[in-house]
Amino acid sequence: MFYNRFNLLTCLILCCSISITLPSCQQTQKAAAEAKGNAEMPEGAEAMSLLGKPLYSNPPNAFLIEQYEAAKAAFTAHPTNADTLIWYGRRAAYLGNYQEAINIFTIGIEQHPDNPRMYRHRGHRYITVREFDKAIMDLEKGSELIQNTDDEVEPDGMPNELGIPVSTLHGNIYYHLGLAYYLKNDRERALKTFQKCLDASTNDDNIVSATHWVYMILRRMDLPDLAEKYLARIFTEMDVVENQAYYQLCLFYKGLITLEELEAQNQAIASSDATTYGIGNWYYYNAQKNKAKEIFEGILAKNSWNSFGYIAAEADLVNLWDE
């Protein structure tokens, strides 16, 4: 939901009075971010937000628990098998147990130090828990290990409706590495890495996701003409299975759908953080920064702290407005 000025003022007043869950109005975002490094995580929390707020996972459903227990049993039976370890870590993450997942992938790196998949998955979860420097170290290592190797399809932990995996190892390493650089506000490295991700794209799902980030970064770098050139591969009736949010954003960037159509579609899919963040970013690089800030703060009012759109909005509120 986008806040109008009255609602935003009301929200800020409430934030001042509810100091248990949000930083006080006197505490700047920068001070909160600095406090994060010194704060101990409360028991039960999986991470600390960039604003110093403890983050807790929602209780998982019975099906996810069943999958996790099966993966754990398979790992216990074959503790040195790379595949069983990866699935054990992935299933732990799907439960919201991100610290456990990181510990599992750390064991995997100790056992299989030359397996890029271990660094890819641990790097992903370091992003989730806001440890961006560690994520970059892992994903850079993974990118080194995949050089001069054939790409491979990554099986889905949560299959799409068609049951067709759409991502690859190389693509995922570059995607998550580019995202980690983006969250650090390192636009040059983020751009180069997402360009590699786009080069590794072999289907429409990967093309629209990588194009979305490349376009946004170039617009933030005030290179609109170059950004437009990257939309050449975007057209209506692309065969997109999973990344509909990124696809609709790319269609909007190219002028093939209107902002009103994009917002209507976003509401129809329960307000995707990815789409909402893309809209906020569009306002940001079109000189409507107050509107962008409203939208980013609206994302943070939700409880979807593990989504990339949420993390990006959080990072922007720290990196771009607290100067």
Image (tube, helix red, strand yellow):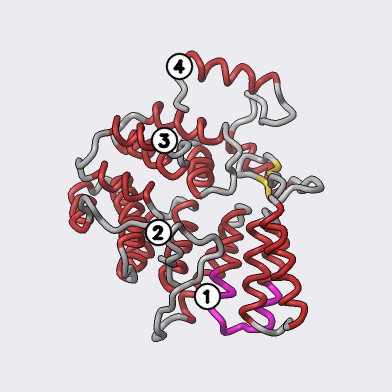
Which circle marks residue 268 in the picture? 3
Identify the secondary structure beneath mark 1. Answer: helix
Q: Is residue 198 above or below residue 117?
A: above
Residue that badge 1 annotates: 141
Measured along the vertical axis of the image, is residue 39 above or below residue 139? Answer: above
Which residue is at 32% across, 56% downward? 208
> Circle 4 is placed at which residue position?
5
Name the residue type under label 4. Arg
Q: How far apart are marks 3 and 1 (CA)?
A: 40 Å
Q: Where residue 264 sits in the image (x, y, percent)?
A: 35, 32
Answer with left or right where residue 258 lies relative to residue 210: left
Please count the marks in the image. 4
| Badge 3 amino acid | Ala
Q: Name the residue under label 2.
A: 190
Chain-order first, disc 3 or disc 4: 4
Helix, strand or loop at disc 2?
A: helix
Q: Which label's residue is closer to the chain start, 3 or 1?
A: 1
Q: Magenta span covers which residues? A: 106-120
